[in-house]
Every structure is written in C-alpha cells, then in structure tokens.
Image (tube, rainbow, N blue to C red):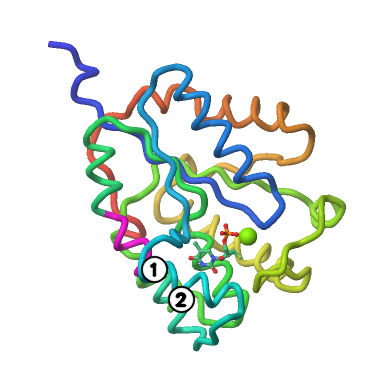
Amino acid sequence: SDPSSSRRGAFIVFEGLDRCGKSTQVARLVDRLERESQKARLQKFPDRTTAIGKMIDAYLQSKAEMDDHAIHLLFSANRWECAAAIKRDLDRGITVIADRYAFSGIAFSAAKGLPFDFCLQPDRALPLPDLTLYMSLPQEEATQRSQFGEERYETVTMQQATRKQFRLVAEEVKKIHGGKKWMEVDARGTIEEVEERLKGLIGDLTDGVNGRVGELWV
Ligand code: FDM
Ligand code: MG
C-alpha cells in the first residue's frame, strides 16, 4: 500500500509582531502551494467573519470596550470555533496555514499585564501546530517600515511589551513540545529573501505528515 495515503496535512502557524511581513509571506506560501497543485487553506486569527470575530473586530477598532480577561477569552473562543474545521481539513490531507494563533493570544494579553498562566489556559488542547514560524524583526527595522495602522495594540510601547512576551511563549513551547515545533526566522531583507528562508524551514512538511495532530500545552 502507498504509505503517503495515510498522511494528514500539516498545520503550520506564522507568528510575529505587526509589520514583520507575516501576512505577505502567508499569502505567498498559499499561492505557491496552489501553483504546485497542493491542497492548502489559509486561516487568519482573529477570524473576524464569525459572530465572536465581529466582537473582536469592534474591540480592535476601539468601537467597543471590553475587560482584558473577557477579550482574551473571546480570542480563544474564536480559535475553538474554528478547531473542528482545522482538524477536519488536516485529516483530508489539506495543509492548514494560520496567520497568528494562540501564541499571539498569550503574548498580547500578557503584554497588557494579565498573568501568563491565565493567558495559557483557555487554549489548552487546541490543535497543536506541527511548526510555528516566528518572524522576528528588530524594533528599529519595524519602525522604519510603513506606519502602524490605527488599531488597538499598534503602538511602539505595546509592540515592545509583546516582543518580550513572545520570548517567554517560545520558551514555553520548547519546554512542553520540544525545540522542533517553534522556529525563529530572521524577517529582515527582501520579501524574496525571507520567503527563501521560510521555504527552507518548511521543507517537505507541505507534502503531509504522519501521526495524529497533537494538543496544545498537553
Ligand atoms: N491578537 C491576535 C490578540 O491580541 N490575541 C489573539 O489571540 C490574536 C489571534 O489582535 F494586534 C491581536 C494581535 C493584533 C490584533 O491581528 C489583530 P491582525 O493580525 O492585525 O488582524
Ligand atoms: Mg494588525
């Protein structure tokens, strides 16, 4: 029998601060996979299209105020409402590529001062990414790129605090899930240069992976 037929799709997550080029690279990866006739789906977090996503969108645009804990739980709920579809697609052999995930959830909320442990808990047992690519850009380079937008969190102070928390998140992933699940990528340079770096790290993951999808923080 063909062993590849038992493979599931890989779950690949892109993380990073605002302006790191994450969304550009995610779009290019999905395009490349489509050109290569591989099955792939992009999942953006927050997914602003759902009922919960609309509440998050209003919060981010400062059209609504919310308690820090409450919005944290909504971001997590937004992932849980997408979890079954992610698992289903992985089982069908589709590569699922996420633009942000639970790691942004922790880093941004902890940067506001919520306890790290509180931030971690609601995402426990969500689908575990096979690989998270953290695109890292020095603060000076991020500032040189185009201006921040108008959304909540798009300030230098918030980005700096979040950068520190992402470092703690990386340590936690390595401690619980091992060093191969989280890779830091130098996000400096041209779009093409960064794309090549990412491609090297992704390797043949997009051909599918063996074994069941794991559970986050378990
Ligand atoms: N963000 C994103 C959070 O605060 N928690 C989360 O769980 C997620 C997924 O939302 F500032 C923040 C990160 C960012 C904002 O993200 C909107 P996009 O990628 O700019 O849409
Ligand atoms: Mg943004």
Q: Is the CB–ligand 1 distance for label 1 below 8 Å?
A: yes
- Count neighbours of disc 1 (C-alpha within 10 A) and say few if under 14, some if 14 to 19, many if 20 or more: many
Q: Position of residue 33 (x, y in %)?
A: 46, 24
Q: Are marks 1 and 2 in contact (CB under 8 Å)?
A: yes
Res 14 visible: yes
What residue appears at the point 46 percent right and 79 percent down from the top-left corner?
Answer: 71
- Count neighbours of disc 2 (C-alpha within 10 A) and say few if under 14, some if 14 to 19, many if 20 or more: many
**SS at mark 1?**
helix
Q: How far is mark 1 from mark 2, CA to CA?
A: 6 Å
- Say above or below: 92 vs 52: above
Farthest residue toward the left?
Answer: 1
Q: Which mark is residue 76?
A: 1
Q: Which mark is residue 110?
A: none
Q: Which residues are magenta?
A: 76-83
Q: Is residue 214 magenta?
A: no
In this rendered view, identify the residue nearer to me: 202 or 84.
Answer: 84
Q: Which residue is mark 2?
A: 72
